[in-house]
Image (cartoon, grey):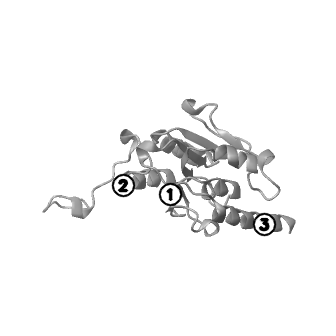
Amino acid sequence: MIEALKTHLGWQAARRLVAARARRLPAEAHLVQRILVVLPTDEAALRAAWRMVEALGAPVVPVVVGDAVAFVPDAFAGAVVRVGRDVLDWRGLPTAAVRARLWAPGLDVAIALGDPSALAGAVLVGASPAGFRVGIDAPETAGWYDLALGAATADPPGELLARLGQIRPSLVPLRRAALPRVAPKVSEREPGARSGV
């Protein structure tokens, strides 16, 4: 009973934070100073997310909500910010000091790849002042993100890379070699070309 009340009050506070956020206008991709990425905690999903993080063409602040990190590539050793129980308030929200540190000036993009129903990660992205916020869609976070990935998406990092690679002008800097190859749409094929399907 008490846990359910704490969770309810946490989501209420989170919605107030999102409504009151001071939004920075999205910059062009080449002007992006910093990208906040809240990573999943499941090891298989985490490995896929790291491949996406390595494709980003701006400094990344990787965040894991939890007390342990299952896997970290050598390039990011020592760079992961762990948001454990010791820095969450009684409702499960990151403390104001943690939010201020992660939302420091220069945060232009925020991406949530973790569990969409996990309050702390959703707040770090949804209520952030970043001009462009991306997350996995969930009933609790409806309307919090500028780009919402479907909850049933099998590979959120892969889908995100594919979508970001299609947005013009680009809002997030990407390393071109890392973009997934996407088959051209039927309308983009040469006239008379046959589909392999």
- Identify the residue position indicated by label 3 in the image: 9
- The residue where tag 1 is placed is 154
From the viewer's perspective, is 167 left or right of 70?
Answer: left
Q: Kindly identify the residue that appears in the image at 56 percent across and 64 percent down.
A: 137
Mark 1 residue crowding within 10 angstroms, few (<14) / some (14–19) / many (20+): few
Q: Kindly check if marks 2 and 1 are in contact, taking CB atoms under 8 A apart as contact.
A: no
Label drawn at residue 166: 2
Q: Amino acid at mark 3?
A: Leu
User: How far is the residue under mark 2 from the one under mark 1?
Assistant: 19 Å
- Three-letter residue code for mark 2: Gln
Image quadrant where one finds the N terminus: bottom right
Q: Nearest the camera: 152 or 116?
A: 116
Residue 159 as seen in the image, left or right of residue 10? left
Element carrying mark 2: helix
Q: Amino acid at mark 1?
A: Ala
50 over 143 or under it: above or below: above
